[in-house]
Image (cartoon, grey):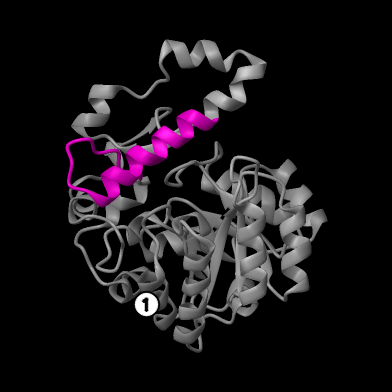
Amino acid sequence: METKLTQLLNIKYPIIQAPMFLVSNVAMVTEGMKAGIAGCIPALNYRTLEQLRAAIIELKANKVEGGSFGFNLIVNKSNIKYKEQLRVLCEEGCDFIITSLGSPEETIKQAHKAGIKVFCDVTDLRFAKKVELLGADAAIAVNNEAGGHRGNLTPQELTNQLSQALTIPVISAGGVGCKADIDKMISYGAEGVSVGSPFIASVEAGVTDEYKQACVDYGEKDIIMTERISGTPCTVINTPYVQKIGTKQTWIERVLNKNKKLKKWVKMIRFSIGMKATENAAKKATYKTVWVAGPSIEHTKAILPVRDIVANLVA
């Protein structure tokens, strides 16, 4: 399965284990590298820079031939830790950085000085062209089947558009749960795929067994969009609790969001409240279950080690 992505990261299979807030960890990425793929962790999964640095050092020690690791950075103003996280990544070194939710210009500049590749999340051609001009090494095409914050275009529409217009590799993110899905994305013009939700139900994932089992018990038809987590539409499992609280913003939030001066602060507060709720659901057994996942959990039939999940994806 050699593609431009396997060449770029020196990996066996063209798969990136997608960075997932609260889910991804060193154990998952280590097992992913051993299985021949690339793994990625959100830098925000670490509360302190010392913890982030320790994770990088551990992953460097665990790295094997045919595997690769990186970190995800939120590069907009909502992430006040961004610049310091970037500094630590460049000081310690990793194979790649994935940028989300903002301009990747500074990240690309600093990471390339440190010999780190930069892949950028994009949801449309306009932004994809911008990141290409800024020097991104690849574009991650986040389509409308991705888990969490997703795009608006289908995998075929977005991947076709980007692969035909860009000179850098396109990595399709969303809608991959089995080998047939990977083959489909590559047929659309992708050089690889970013896979997240199937790895939630891994032995190594850092979440509760209840969350993992939910990814087994629920399927594609149970994934819905909600605005109640970050203020931005996000895909979650339609649990009884989600049904109870609803998926739309409250009328107060809607009114405040129309005020230009207050909008930014409302979003920051909603994001903070939503992330705390997500953390509680991921880390504790609670009836307040807000479990983020994408429709590709349709193919998740059991809680398995990462190595077995990779084997199923490439079999």
Label 1 environment density (alpha carbons within 10 Å; few <14, some 14–19, many ≥20)? many
Give the camera-side residue of 226 and 269: 269
Where does the image place residue 77, in percent across and percent down from the top left? 65, 41
How many numbered marks have been drawn onto this rendered protein structure?
1
Give the camera-side residue of 245 and 141: 245
Quick check: can you spot residue 116?
yes
Q: Is residue 138 magenta?
A: no
Residue furthest to the right: 133
The quadrant of the rendering that contains the C terminus is bottom left
User: On the image, numbered disc 1 is attached to which residue?
Assistant: 31
Q: Residue at x 51, y 89 (%)?
A: 65
Where does the image place residue 36, in percent across and percent down from the top left? 45, 80
Callout 1, which amino acid? Answer: Glu
Segment colored magenta: 268-292
Relative side of 266 to 167, left or right: left
Note whether 262 is above or below 295 in the view shown: above
Residue furthest to the bottom: 65
Q: Is residue 277 magenta?
A: yes
